[in-house]
Amino acid sequence: MPHSVRNEPAEKANVPAHVAIIMDGNGRWAAQRGLPRLEGHRRGVEAVRTVTNAARDLGIRILTLYAFSVENWNRPKAEVGGLMSLLEFYLKQELKTFVKDRVRLRTIGRIDELPAGVQKHLRHTIAETAHFTDYTLVLALNYGSRTEVVDAARAYAAAVAAGREKLNDGSWATFNRYLATADLPDPDLIIRTSGETRLSNFLLLQGAYAELVFTPVLWPDFGKAELVSACAEYARRERRYGLTTDQVKPAPTTTA
Ligand code: IPE
Ligand code: IPE
Ligand code: MG
């Protein structure tokens, strides 16, 4: 991995190619203002728009947003319904912007369990933006790492049974092709807002060597400045992938 030249502005040096965000704190943002939780989610959608643009401006190639977990179905019915309506509304509104800004939309998660209206808009938006190559927005919807692994293991077993894979291959590269993220590079940076310091079933395998940044800022208040600051923190880190510091240090000539 190339390392940052320390004198450059942080947002230019060593930009993470793939940033994944656990967008947390909408409910608390609303509660602090005496508003219904759904108002927090509405403001959360505004933050999604802001951060999607900011990430592109910073040169990030892939932005993955954790929007709804498999565990989130257990919330009160009205909140789940409200979130699904918001999602459908967002997709309807955003298509034009995605096309104008050349944003490719993708999803990870069990999409076929989402309401039919949401699925319809997702499939349409994904098809209309599939040819864009510079910037990808990945929405994690009805996503959880554990269900993802179960789905991948099932698909892998079926491929072995059909003679398309060898059971004794046993390599990560092979199994990785059965994950929802098969064609995406691993996240370089995972950010979680709202002060919680856990992963909540998000990209547990893909994040094996991701840098983690936790911020107390609630998701509706997260904007470009907060993203820049998380990327600056990322640029200060040294990723070692199991090697020694000496092995990963840049050659002395590059730091003149
Ligand atoms: C994140 O905000 C959005 C979703 C999980 C859908 P929360 O709704 O979890 O907000 P808090 O954690 O209750 O503040
Ligand atoms: C994680 O947030 C899921 C999303 C951001 C979509 P939660 O609010 O659901 O996570 P926990 O329950 O606090 O771990
Ligand atoms: Mg939460």
Image (cartoon, grey):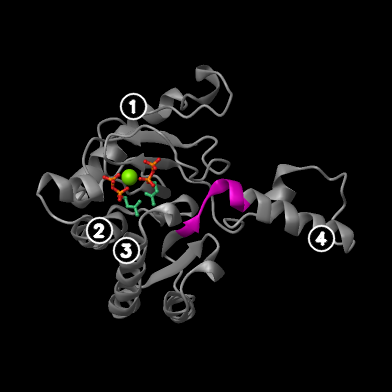
Q: Residue at x 67, y 51 (%)?
A: 150
In the image, the residue with mark 2 has its CB under 8 Å from the nearest atom of ligand 1? yes
Q: Residue at x 54, y 56 (%)?
A: 184
Considering only order in the chain, which callout, 4 or 2, is on the residue closer to the N terminus? Answer: 2
List x then y, in percent, for residue 169: 84, 45
Q: What's the residue type where badge 2 is placed? A: His
On residue 29, the disc is none
Considering only order in the chain, which callout, 3 or 4, is on the residue closer to the N terminus? Answer: 3
Considering only order in the chain, which callout, 3 or 2, is on the residue closer to the N terminus? Answer: 2
Q: Could you tell me which secondary element the residue under label 2 belongs to?
A: helix
User: Whole-Å distance between the Cαs marked 4 and 1?
Assistant: 52 Å
Nearer the camera: disc 2 or disc 4: 2
Considering only order in the chain, which callout, 1 or 2, is on the residue closer to the N terminus? Answer: 2
Q: Nearer the viewer, residue 240 or 221?
A: 221
Determine which quarter of the picture holds residue 76: bottom left
Q: Could you tell me which secondary element the residue under label 4 belongs to?
A: helix
Apparent side of residue 33 relative to residue 40 in the rendered image (left or right): left
Considering only order in the chain, which callout, 1 or 4, is on the residue closer to the N terminus? Answer: 4
List x then y, in percent, for residue 94: 30, 75
Residue corresponding to mark 2 = 41
Please determine whether, in this image, residue 189 is positioned above or below residue 143.
above
Q: Residue at x 80, y 42 (%)?
A: 170
Nearer the camera: disc 2 or disc 3: 3
> Badges 3 and 1: C-beta atoms under 8 Å apart?
no
Residue corresponding to mark 3 = 78
Residue 197 falls within the magenta-colored stretch: no
Q: Could you tell me which secondary element the residue under label 1 belongs to?
A: loop
Residue corresponding to mark 4 = 159
Q: Identify the magenta region.
A: 141-148
Q: What's the residue type where badge 3 is placed? A: Ala
Nearer the camera: disc 4 or disc 3: 3
Apparent side of residue 11 relative to residue 142 in the rendered image (left or right): left
